[in-house]
Image (cartoon, helix red, strand yellow):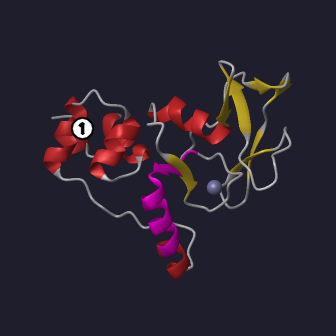
Amino acid sequence: MRKYNNKPNRTSYKNKELRLKEMENGCIECISHKIPKRGYPIITRDKERQKLGKYLYEKEFGKVEKKLDMCHKCDNPKCVNIEHIYFGTRKENVRDMMVRNRNQKGEMKVNSKLKEWQIQEIMKSNKNLHELGKMYKVAPATIRDVKKGKTWKHITKR
Ligand SMILES: [Zn+2]
């Protein structure tokens, strides 16, 4: 399994260091702070309350539009694993939820493959990973791998 830096560096909340733990199912949960029942782990950044999952996601993939809701492929609201988190409009989220319930599976199926010309566009683009992911309907981690040359080497290293 690939390892990503999900740890918020020196992030603390209420003067207590944030500690995250990876669960057996791959979810990463906050174990240092009490999480509101049915709620998301919250931290305060720049005097603003923010969901911890969103904070970690934006740190890796770039800014997310305010109008979008945070949701989880794993259906575990406590999870802050940025590979499990995605953002969408309320309408998209409701649709995804229905698809998931029908399939009775935790993983959402997003199998859209990128085309060669899209890879070239991605390499040239200055947009952040989140925005590009939305544009091409793939996970931001997929875009990151393209940018880093992990995938599609034959195109990006030409
Ligand atoms: Zn998860």
Report x, y in % for residue 102: 51, 81
Residue at x-position 84% and y-position 39%: 33
Image location of residue 37, percent across then percent down: 82, 53
Dot 1: element: helix
Residue marked by disc 1: 122
Asked if residue 150 shows in the view, the reply is no
In the image, residue 96 lies at what x, y percent? 47, 66
- The quadrant the C terminus occupies is top left
Rendered image quadrant of residue 101: bottom right
Give the residue type that dot 1 points to.
Answer: Ile
Say which quarter of the image contains residue 119: top left
| Residue 115 shown left or right of residue 111 in the figure | left
Span shown in magenta: 82-98
Q: Residue 19 lies in magenta, yes or no?
A: no
Please state the quadrant of the image where ligand 1 appears: bottom right
The answer to whether residue 79 is above or below residue 98 is above
